[in-house]
Image: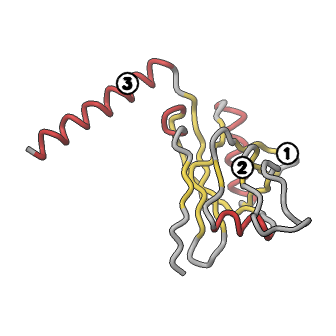
Amino acid sequence: MDNKIKIRNKRISWEYFLIDKIVAGIVLTGTEIKSIREGKANLADSYCYFEGGELFVRNMHISEYLYGTYNNHLAKRDRKLLLNRRELKKMQRQVKEKSMTIVPVVLFINDKGYAKLEIALAKGKHFYDKRNTLKDKDHKREIDREMKK
């Protein structure tokens, strides 16, 4: 399959330091996967949380399927993420001990046609960290301009 669906959360690298990334499966209904294949999803303001030893993603917006009937899904419902027990325990321990958060980075469809969500353990940036990120970005842009001349 030739899948080019990659829905990114562009604000994540601005607001957080990404420590560790993991790819997780996601439990979806039929109309949700059809909307994702059309590229109608948004990861802005979404985050992951633990409930009962399981990991869920909240505020991930998947638009309703245009041709869906009464079986259409809710746009912002909580969706379960599929990880093995060892990965879940490791992430839960780091969230509790080191006060980190888990954020979705990229939603994509793999070669087999399954929707996957790349999540990351992240630590929040302070205001001065964001200024440093802007400075680094500007320096890189200037260097690229000079290299092209």
**Disc 3 element:** helix
Tell me the distance, in whole angstroms, between the alpha carbons under discs 1 and 2: 20 Å
Expressed as whole percent of the image width and height from the top left, the position of residue 130 reads 45, 25
Chain-order first, disc 1 or disc 2: 1
Q: Which residue is mark 3?
A: 132
Q: CA distance from mark 2 to mark 3?
A: 31 Å
Residue at 77% x, 58% y: name it.
Answer: 64
Instruction: Give SS at disc 2.
Output: strand
Residue 96 placement (x, y as % from top left) = 72, 34
User: Does dot 1 land on a helix, a strand or a loop?
Assistant: strand
Left or right, residue 112 beside residue 140: right
Question: Considering depth in this image, is 94 or 5 the residue closer to the camera?
Answer: 5
- Give the mark, 2 or 3, whose residue is nearer the N terminus: 2
For label 2, the residue is 61
- The structure residue drawn at horizontal position 78% and vertical position 63%, both measured from the top left corner, is 27
Residue wearing tag 1:
51
Q: Nearer the viewer, mark 1 or mark 2?
A: 2
Judge the density around disc 3: few (<14), some (14-19), many (≥20) Cα neighbours within 10 Å. Answer: few
Marking on residue 39: none
* Residue at the spot 72% in from the left edge and 49% down from the top edge: 61
